[in-house]
C-alpha cells in the first residue's frame, strides 16, 4: 500500500505527511470494510439460526397438532362406540356392560389426558367417572334398576328406554330410587287403608288407625326424597 502511495506521490509531489495521511485513511477504510464484512457474516449467520429455529418450531407445532388430534379422535371414537353399544342394547344387562366399560375407560384417563384444554369435556368426564366409581354409582344403579323391575314400578322396556336416554347416571339413579321409595310407601299405606276399610268392629278400626299412625311415625326423617311427596303425606308424617 505504501509503495503504491509512493508511486502516486512521485506524480503529484506528495510529501511524507501526505503519504501517511493517505495510508492511514486507506487502512482505516480497509478496517471498516473488514468489520462490515464480519458484521454482515454474523447477521447472515444469525438469520440462518433464526430461520432454523422458526422451522423447528413449525415442525414442533405440526407434531403437537397431530398428537392432539390423535388424542381427540381416540376419545371421540370411544364415546361414539359406547353410545352405539348402549343404543343397540336389547337388554338392561347389555346397557350395564357398556356403562361399565365406559367407566373403566374414563377412570383410567384421570391425569392421562395430555391436552386437557383442548379436550376439557373429556377431562370432566374422567373426573366424573372417578367420582361415580368412589360412590359405587353403577352397582347402585344396577341394583335399583333390578328392584324397580322386580316390584313392577317400571316395565323392563321402560327401564331399558330410560337407561338409553339417560344424560346423567346420577339423575337416573335418583329417578329410579325415588319412584321405588314412593311405590313401597304407597303399597304399605294402601294395605293399611284396605284393612281399615274392611274393618268390621270398632277394635279393628282402631287397630288399623293405630297401625297407620305408627306407619307415618316410622317415616319421620327416613324419607330420602321428601321433596317428591305432596303436603298430605308430609303432614301425616309430621302429625304422627
Image (cartoon, grey):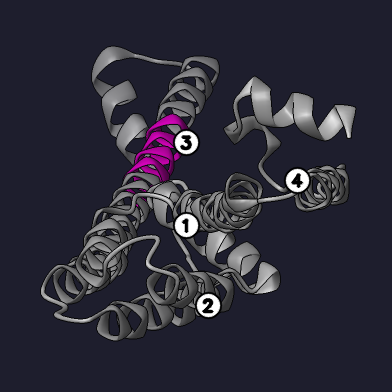
Give x and y (percent) for residue 103.
46, 75
Looking at the image, which residue is at 28% across and 33% down?
7
Residue 223 drawn above or below residue 105: above
Looking at the image, which residue is at 14% across and 80% down?
90
Residue 228 drawn above or below residue 155: above
Looking at the image, which residue is at 20% across and 67% down?
157
* In-image side of 47 versus 235 (left or right): left
Q: Earlier in the sequence, mark 2 or mark 1?
A: 2
Question: Is residue 66 something one can see in this rendering?
Answer: no
Are the residues at dot 2 and dot 1 in contact (C-beta closer than 8 Å)? no
Are the residues at dot 3 and dot 2 in contact (C-beta closer than 8 Å)? no
Task: Name the residue nearer the viewer: 199 or 26.
Answer: 199
Separation of marks 2 and 1 at Cα, in angstroms: 10 Å
Are the residues at dot 3 and dot 4 in contact (C-beta closer than 8 Å)? no
The numbered disc on residue 176 is 1
Separation of marks 1 and 4 at Cα, in angstroms: 35 Å
Separation of marks 3 and 4 at Cα, in angstroms: 124 Å
- Dot 1 falls on a residue whose secondary structure is helix
Are the residues at dot 2 and dot 4 in contact (C-beta closer than 8 Å)? no
The numbered disc on residue 31 is 3
Separation of marks 2 and 4 at Cα, in angstroms: 38 Å
Where, by quadrant of the figure, is residue 153 drawn?
Answer: bottom left
Predominant secondary structure, magenta span: helix
| Residue at which label 4 appears | 205
The numbered disc on residue 143 is 2
Task: Name the residue nearer the viewer: 4 or 135.
Answer: 135
Task: Name the residue nearer the viewer: 111 or 212.
Answer: 212
Chain part drawn in magenta:
30-45
Amino acid at each position: 500500500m505504501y509503495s503504491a502511495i509512493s508511486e502516486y506521490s512521485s506524480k503529484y509531489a506528495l510529501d511524507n505527511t501526505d503519504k501517511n495521511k493517505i495510508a492511514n485513511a486507506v487502512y482505516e477504510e480497509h478496517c471498516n470494510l473488514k468489520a462490515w464484512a464480519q458484521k454482515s457474516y454474523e447477521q447472515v449467520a444469525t438469520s440462518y439460526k433464526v430461520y432454523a429455529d422458526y422451522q423447528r418450531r413449525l415442525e414442533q407445532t405440526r407434531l403437537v397438532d397431530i398428537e392432539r388430534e390423535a388424542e381427540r379422535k381416540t376419545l371421540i371414537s370411544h364415546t361414539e362406540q359406547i353410545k352405539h353399544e348402549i343404543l343397540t342394547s336389547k337388554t338392561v344387562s347389555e346397557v350395564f356392560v357398556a356403562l361399565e366399560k365406559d367407566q373403566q375407560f374414563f377412570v383410567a384417563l384421570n391425569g392421562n389426558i395430555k391436552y386437557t384444554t383442548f379436550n376439557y369435556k373429556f377431562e370432566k368426564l374422567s373426573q366424573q367417572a372417578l367420582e361415580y366409581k368412589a360412590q359405587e354409582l353403577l352397582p347402585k344403579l344396577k341394583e335399583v334398576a333390578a328392584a324397580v323391575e322386580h316390584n313392577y314400578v317400571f316395565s323392563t322396556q321402560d327401564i331399558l328406554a330410560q337407561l338409553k336416554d339417560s344424560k346423567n347416571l346420577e339423575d337416573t339413579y335418583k329417578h329410579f330410587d325415588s319412584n321405588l321409595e314412593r311405590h313401597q310407601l304407597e303399597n304399605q299405606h294402601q294395605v293399611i287403608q284396605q284393612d281399615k276399610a274392611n274393618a268390621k268392629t270398632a277394635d279393628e278400626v282402631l287397630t288399623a288407625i293405630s297401625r297407620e299412625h305408627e306407619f307415618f311415625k316410622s317415616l319421620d326423617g327416613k324419607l330420602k326424597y321428601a321433596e317428591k311427596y305432596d303436603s298430605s303425606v308430609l303432614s301425616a308424617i309430621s302429625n304422627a
